[in-house]
């Protein structure tokens, strides 16, 4: 099981949190998603076939790109 935490500047409210959690949970291999509108971050637990690339691509597609600047 892999755990990643990404900074996502576009998270602004509970709606964003809900959207991210719903979309990422649909990705095969993702076991849990917790987004936070205060810290503007998301914690994802996953295993294959999910990958960091797949998670980042999905977040970009739904307009919540991962920040390149901030490594949590
Ligand atoms: Cu929002």
Image: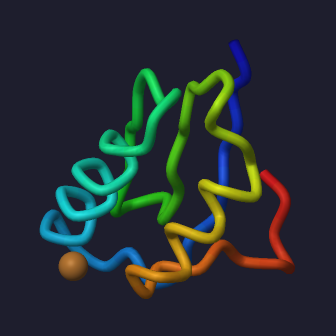
Q: Quadrant of residue 13?
A: bottom left
The total number of labels drawn is 0
Residue 60 x, y percent position in the rendering: 55, 80
Quadrant of ligand 1 in image: bottom left
Q: Residue at x 68, y 25 (%)?
A: 48
- Quadrant assignment, res 33: top left
The front one of 18 and 54 is 54
Give the camera-side residue of 20 and 41: 20
| Residue 70 in the image: above or below residue 32 | below
Left or right: 62 with respect to 54? Answer: left
| Residue depicted at x 41% and y 26% | 32
As drawn, is 66 to the left or to the right of 12? right
Q: Is residue 35 left or right of residue 48?
A: left
Residue 11, horizontal then vertical, whole percent: 38, 75
Residue 62 lies in what quarter of the image? bottom left
Residue at left 65%, top 22%? 47
Quadrant of the image containing the N terminus: top right
* Residue 65, placed above or below residue 39: below
Indicate the position of residue 72 as horizontal and vertical percent values: 78, 51
The color scheme shown is: rainbow
Q: Nearer the viewer, residue 60 or 41?
A: 60
Q: Where is residue 20? Give x, y as percent.
A: 33, 60
């Amino acid at each position: 099981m892999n755990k990643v935490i990404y900074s996502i500047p576009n998270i602004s409210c509970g709606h964003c949190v809900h959207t991210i959690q719903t979309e990422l949970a649909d990705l095969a291999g993702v076991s849990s998603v917790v987004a936070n509108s205060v810290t503007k971050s998301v914690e994802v637990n996953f295993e294959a076939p999910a990958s960091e690339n797949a998670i980042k691509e999905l977040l970009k597609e739904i307009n919540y790109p991962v920040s390149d600047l901030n490594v949590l």
